[in-house]
Amino acid sequence: MNLHRIADLTVDLGYKYERMKKQADAYRIRSENIDPEVTIYLSDSFLEQKCRETPAMTPEMAEYIYTGSVFYSGLILFGGFMLHASAVLMDGKAYLFSAQSGVGKSTHTAMWQKVFGRERAKILNDDKPAIRIEKDGIYAFGTPWSGKTDLNINVKAPIAGICFIERGKTNKIRRENGGAVIGKMLSQTIRPYDEKDMDMLLGHIERILKEIPIYTLSCNISEEAVHTAYNAMSGKAE
């Protein structure tokens, strides 16, 4: 076994290519006495098939992408899912920013580091943080699957809020009614084909929308946008 601890789950994660090995190293645990809750091993034939389906894809890329997909399928069974978002860890809490690709969520969170400093504001995960409902709260986790930038840390933090970003000329943020953003949430995660898994995912999202503050931020790429988001989501006016 090749055990890792990801989102508070013990994962037997097999890989043969350097990218996945590098990304997973911070999550690896040195034990052979724990039964895995999730097992991920992809065959060479599976990777070859995926490369045939997408000619621009290499086996290394396929391994990175589809190990994440298998983990996601297992995560749903344990009260969680991965959100297409860039997550900032600051003062012990996670701030998640989600948007369609190209809107600027990673640019926005990078600005948090510019404003608050890299020691205070850390990128928890720049593409696919895990969200998981646990007995004592709802948490965001770094995962090895973090998109093109590879920015992630193996840390768990309670969620201060989830914010959907829209481009705007001025910076405005509003608190959303949970029910109004179910569609946005579903559009930024993987929707399972299995009906039972889909029902579980909807249940997780419903619980999160009830307990976690949800926002929409209309913003430009500026330091003012960071202050606008932080002041609203933290409840602390600077």
Image (cartoon, grey):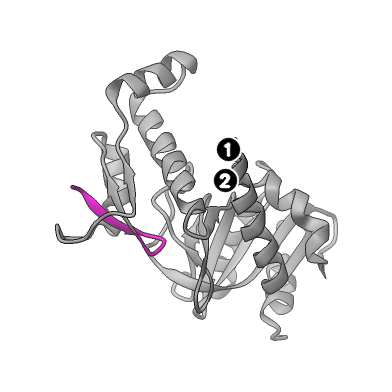
The correct choice, above or below, for 22 with respect to 95 in the image is: above
Amino acid at circle 1: Asp
Q: Which amino acid does label 2 sit on?
A: Asp
Indicate whether 180 appears above or below 211: above
State the residue in front, 107 or 21: 21
Mark 1 neighbour density, 10 Å: few (under 14) some (14–19) many (20 or more): few
Find residue 162 and report its image quarter: bottom right
Q: Is residue 117 magenta?
A: no
Between residues 143 and 89, which one lies in front from this camera angle?
A: 143
The residue depicted at 26 percent of the width and 34 percent of the height is: 17
Q: Which mark is residue 142?
A: none
Location of mark 1 (residue): 194
Instruction: Give the residue at x 83% y 58%.
Output: 180
- Image: 101 above or below 156: above
Q: Name the residue under label 2.
A: 197
Residue 106 image position (x, y, % from top left): 59, 53
Residue 101 in the image: x percent, y percent? 65, 41
Q: As rendered, which of 175 and 41 lies closer to the eye?
A: 41
Q: How crowded is mark 2: few (under 14 residues within 10 Å), some or many (20 or more)?
A: some
Q: Identify the residue at the far front of this view.
A: 196
Secondary structure, mark 2, is helix
Regarding residue 117, the answer to whether it shows in the image is: no
Task: Identify the magenta region.
Answer: 1-9
Q: CB under 8 Å between callouts 2 and 1?
A: yes
